[in-house]
Image (tube, rainbow, N blue to C red):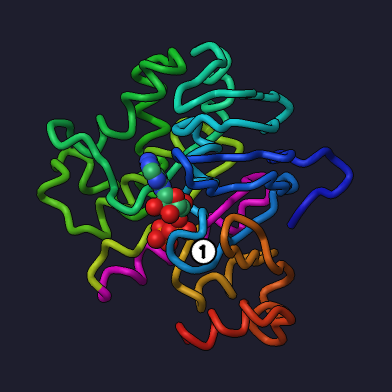
Amino acid sequence: MTNTTDPPIIEFSDVTKRFGVLTVLDQFNFSVAKGEKVTLIGPSGSGKSTVLRILMTLEPFQEGTLTLAGTSYHEPGARGRFKASEKHLRQIRNHVGMVFQSFNLFPHMTVLRNVVEAPVRVLGMQRAEAEVRAIELLQMVGLADKKDHYPVQLSGGQQQRVAIARALAMRPRVLLFDEPTSALDPQLVGEVLGVIRALAHEHDLTMLLVTHEMRFAREVSDRVCFFDKGRICEQGAPEEIFGQPKHERTREFLASIL
Ligand SMILES: Nc1ncnc2c1ncn2[C@@H]1O[C@H](COP(=O)(O)OP(=O)(O)OP(=O)(O)O)[C@@H](O)[C@H]1O
């Protein structure tokens, strides 16, 4: 469900990103409406993760403007380091939650503390309030009974579900998923996809996913973007992209993986 009357919640305007001599995004334009669920698919190395990392302010860029929930961010001429102030970057980052391929939980903290720490430290939330919210989120991902366990005591699928709860604890407006199931054993993929599928029904939450799970992309996305060599080659509703891809590169890619 999307709201097309509001301005886009994510907007890349002519963003160029280079790593040394390699141009990964070349005057990239892309926008996502509030509440929209968008999937990026495409060959390895085409720049999908770079888009997410720029949104998370983990990577500076050299040209163009990124606007996120009304805050613009511009990095003209930046060469591998940020020009924007840390305060400004934080304003952007606080709108965004990210779920990585490799869970990235803090190994020395219990499941509950993994979910509670960022809202307390970054948002200044009272610990008791953060714990109530964390337990609600752990219930939502089916892991409230594991709140006193340490990450090492959990399966990969369970760790990824904690990582999703942790990202949601920051009340992000945008949730990014970078191949959230690719580090999991096949039998654990379903439980993580089930949680993400449930989140896709949250109307106000904007989701941007990079995935190699095409069946899943088809199920959860309002829009699928086929990404090739740093640009969106073709985009549309899942039934269009998977049913009647128009671009030859999209057809080749889908034929190679399906
Ligand atoms: N920190 C970095 N330094 C140098 N080159 C990088 C860096 N990060 C990414 N790249 C390069 O940028 C290009 C795009 O990488 P990116 O990870 O965004 O692609 P991707 O489409 O997400 O690929 P995959 O599906 O394999 O994750 C690749 O050629 C990659 O080698």
Q: Position of residue 86 (x, y in %)?
A: 49, 13
Residue 199 in sight in this render: yes
Q: How many numbered marks, from 0 up?
A: 1
Q: Please identify the residue farthest to the right as the structure is shown.
A: 5
Looking at the picture, does residue 82 appear above or below residue 202? above
Indicate whether residue 61 is drawn in magenta.
no
Q: Position of residue 75 (x, y in %)?
A: 61, 24
Indicate whether residue 202 is drawn in magenta.
yes
Whether the residue carrying mark 1 lies under 8 Å from ligand 1 is answered with no
Looking at the picture, does residue 173 appear above or below residue 90? below
Residue 195 in sight in this render: no
Q: Position of residue 227 (x, y in %)?
A: 59, 63
Q: Is residue 118 left or right of residue 185?
A: right
Residue drawn 23% across the image and 48% down it: 145
Residue drawn 42% across the image and 17% down it: 122
Residue drawn 27% across the image and 75% down it: 186
10 Å crowding of disc 1: few (<14), some (14-19), many (20+)? some
Q: Please identify the residue farthest to the front as the structure is shown.
A: 21
Numbered range of the magenta stretch: 186-209
Q: Position of residue 37 (x, y in %)?
A: 64, 57
Q: Mark 1 = which residue?
A: 197
Snapshot quadrant of residue 248: bottom right
- In front of the other: 132 or 108: 108
Residue drawn 10% across the image and 50% down it: 153
Snapshot quadrant of residue 222: bottom right
Amino acid under disc 1 = Arg
